[in-house]
């Protein structure tokens, strides 16, 4: 089993880094050793784990299935090292949170830091795809996402819901109103988020249901950039209420159609019963239940 462990470790490193060269650097051993160990693993079990195309490698179906298992094996090894490091620093634990929304994760972090002053927190911001990849790779412990895939590897808890608001310049006609119907968007120049944004997806879905055309004049991949573009008079935009930053010259307006964006707290199912993770997930579920009441 020790021999297999070395071979499987080399396989995992190549699958994780998509390269034999990068895997060698990751494990701090020579590339010939990596190649030999992966070849030995494939030969011993008569299976092809990678398609090799020059320097680029791609997992076969068998390789993908094995990688799903090795993510857990070596991810838990990393978790053990992190525990030892946190004990060395006199902390009782380290909680790594990845999120798609800075305001949402900061709101959560504030609550957690008050409840767990002896815990160290590491916060990072990612796209949905990046956050999920880091969660599967054991690089983060919890992901806060606005989009949820059905995946048996995940344990998912609804976290919070926020309304989507329109943001306009202070001299815009809507600025004097407390709310507007979504249909009013048809007469406006709209600054959109990039494709893949959950806010954009919900806005487009709401408009399709009402047969409303969106006059998109610009796409930006940053909420802050959208706010500044609105302040310059380039158009109107849409964000979840918690993400609205009151940049001078802008105003947030409620939508009467009540579009909302839901955020979920996700952890790997194999880790959901870790004491710290279980406490955080149960707390989130309780808060959601209390808000509904």
Image: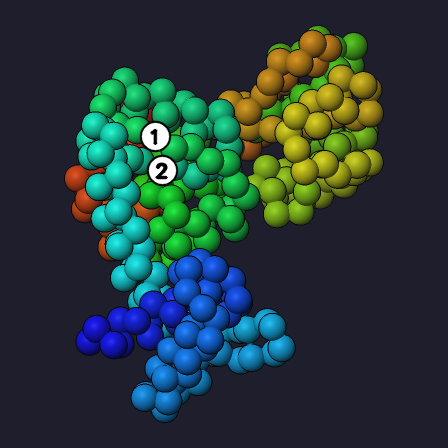
Instruction: Answer above or below: position of 250 versus 201.
Output: above
Q: Position of residue 287 (x, y in %)?
A: 28, 27
Q: Is residue 287 visible?
A: no
Q: x, y percentage for residue 86? A: 25, 35
Residue holding disc 1 = 121
Q: Quadrant of the C terminus?
A: top left
Q: Name above or below for residue 169 compared with residue 157.
A: above
Q: Which mark is residue 203?
A: none
Coloration of the structure image:
rainbow
Q: Residue at x 40, y 60 (%)?
A: 27
The residue nearer to you, when weighing 287 against 7, is 7
Q: Residues within 10 Å of mark 1 (few under 14, many from 20)?
A: some
Can you give x and y, in whole percent of width and height, for residue 81 in the image?
Answer: 26, 47
Element under label 1?
Answer: strand
Residue 96 is labelled as: 2
Disc 1/disc 2 C-alpha distance (Å)? 6 Å
Residue 279 is left or right of residue 268, and the answer is left
Residue at position x 39%, y 47% in the image: 139
Q: Residue at x 26, y 71 (%)?
A: 5
Classify residue 198 as left or right of residue 249: left
Q: Quadrant of residue 254?
A: top right
Q: Position of residue 80 (x, y in %)?
A: 23, 48
Q: Nearer the viewer, residue 224 or 149?
A: 224
Residue at (54%, 43%) from the top-left corner?
Answer: 127
> Is there CB contact under 8 Å for labels 1 and 2?
yes
Task: Tell which residue pokes out farthest to the front in this image.
Answer: 30
Crowd around label 2: few <14 · some 14–19 · many ≥20 (10 Å):
some
| Quadrant showing the N terminus | bottom left
Image quadrant of residue 74?
Answer: bottom left
């Amino acid at each position: 089993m020790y021999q297999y462990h070395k071979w499987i470790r080399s396989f995992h490193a190549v699958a994780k880094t998509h390269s034999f060269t990068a895997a060698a650097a990751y494990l701090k051993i020579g590339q010939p050793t990596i190649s030999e160990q992966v070849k030995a693993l494939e030969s011993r079990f008569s299976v092809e784990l990678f398609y090799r195309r020059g320097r680029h490698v791609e997992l076969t179906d068998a390789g993908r299935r094995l990688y799903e298992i090795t993510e857990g094996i070596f991810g838990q090894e990393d978790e053990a090292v992190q525990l030892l490091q946190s004990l060395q620093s006199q902390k009782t634990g380290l909680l790594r949170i990845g999120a798609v929304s800075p305001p949402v994760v900061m709101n959560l972090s504030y609550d957690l830091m008050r409840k767990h002053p002896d815990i160290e927190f590491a916060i990072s911001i990612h796209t949905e795809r990046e956050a999920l990849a880091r969660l599967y790779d054991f690089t983060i412990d919890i992901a806060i996402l606005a989009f949820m895939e059905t995946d048996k590897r995940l344990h998912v808890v609804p976290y919070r819901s926020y309304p989507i608001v329109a943001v306009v310049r202070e001299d815009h006609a809507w600025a004097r109103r407390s709310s507007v119907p979504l249909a009013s968007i048809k007469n406006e120049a709209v600054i959109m988020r990039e494709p893949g944004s959950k806010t954009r997806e919900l806005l487009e879905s709401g408009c399709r249901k009402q047969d409303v055309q969106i006059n998109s004049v610009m796409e930006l991949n940053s909420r802050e950039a959208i706010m500044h573009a609105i302040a310059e008079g380039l158009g109107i935009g849409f964000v979840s209420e918690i993400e609205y930053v009151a940049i001078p010259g802008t105003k947030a307006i409620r939508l009467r159609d009540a579009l909302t964006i839901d955020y979920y707290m996700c952890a790997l199912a194999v880790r959901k019963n870790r004491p710290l993770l279980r406490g955080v997930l149960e707390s989130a579920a309780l808060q959601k239940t209390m808000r509904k009441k």
